[in-house]
Amino acid sequence: MGKFNISRVAKDHGFGLAVLGCAAVAFAFPQAFISWGGVKLVSLVVPAIQLIMFGMGTTLSANDFLSVAKSPWAVVLGVALQFVVMPLIGLSLVGIFGFTGELAAGFILVGAVAGGTASNVVAYLAGANVALSVTMTCCSTLISPFATPLLMKLLAGRFMDISAKKMMIDCLKIVLVPVLAGGVVRYAFRRTFEEKKALCGRVLSLVSMAGICFTILVLTADGHATLRDVGALIVAAAVLHNILGYAGGYWAARLLGRVLRLDERDARTVAIEVGMQNSGMAAALSKSALGSTTAALPATVFSIWMDFSGSVLANYWRKKKAN
């Protein structure tokens, strides 16, 4: 049995531990993250997610979309599972745990959004198919302004009043417009992005991680009272949602592997993509489209657990070579 190596743990699970730390600090000292200089920090959640989406847009290139032609069925499977399995798991957990109102809508929203950009990093660390991961994230992100409002209207409409039109407009503003703007900037300065690819990647990763940590700090502090009262149930449901997403994605890809010509690396990629949701997008939509910070709590808890579990899963798969 090897010795415990704290530097190795920090390297393998640094971001996940940072996210857990942010949540713990915000829960212990909520008043420190409510407002600064008279500005309510929760009002900055949407701009923070837009900045992350802009950063994602600057990483995209024509090759990312051309790769759809190389693995069309894998992309179709991943996106289908994203918008079918995850929302239904969310709805099932709402019934099992007895959530109602804004909390119920929040859990369904976590399942109804696109794949998270963190999945691309986890796919890389896990030795999975990064190109496929990026392609699935791109496709689910571009589809989400239309799929997410429809799913929310169908599945969450009985828990609170939901305007599919307003949610679609907010999805376009929060997700699609920033991503497209990032793509335009990348194209305009494509030579710079190519020449300094490593530097740009590091900067964008840091900005994304900072944005995620900021969102978790603010939303954990804002929802402190609710988390204190029913936090254990929210955590349990979020953990199950994430794990069932990993398992559902992996085994669906394995069972259909021969038909769709998917190998073990592809199955791992689908699992990561399905299990890791764009919880930041869900939190932003909770605030803008649903007008509820309570509805954002499932996304906040899901994000905390997802980033940690993703780093653990990546470390496990990296050590276990794909067949």
Image (spheres, rainbow, N blue to C red):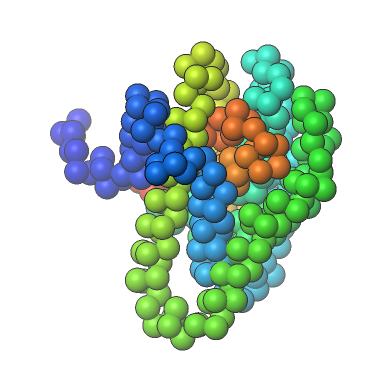
Residue at image position (38%, 39%) is 19
**Looking at the figure, which quarter contains the N terminus?**
top left
| Frontmost residue, 63 versus 226 | 226
Above or below, 49 against 176 in this view is above
The total number of labels drawn is 0
Residue at image position (59%, 40%) is 283
| Frontmost residue, 64 versus 271 | 64
- Horizontally, residue 218 falls left or right of residue 92, namely left
| Frontmost residue, 276 versus 53 | 53
Q: Is residue 258 visible?
A: no
**Could you say where residue 248 lies in the image, as x and y percent from the top left?**
63, 36
Q: Residue furthest left?
A: 3
Residue at image position (67%, 61%) is 176
**Could you say where residue 184 lies in the image, as x and y percent from the top left?**
60, 76
Above or below, 266 against 307 in this view is below
Residue at image position (70%, 51%) is 170
| Residue 21, image quadrant | top left
- Horizontally, residue 51 falls left or right of residue 71, namely left
Q: Residue furthest bottom?
A: 191
| Residue 287, image quadrant | top right
Above or below, 189 against 114 in this view is below
**Could you say where residue 261 lies in the image, as x and y percent from the top left?**
66, 57
Q: Is residue 108 visible?
A: yes
- Horizontally, residue 270 falls left or right of residue 217, namely right
**Could you say where residue 189 lies in the image, as x and y percent from the top left?**
49, 83
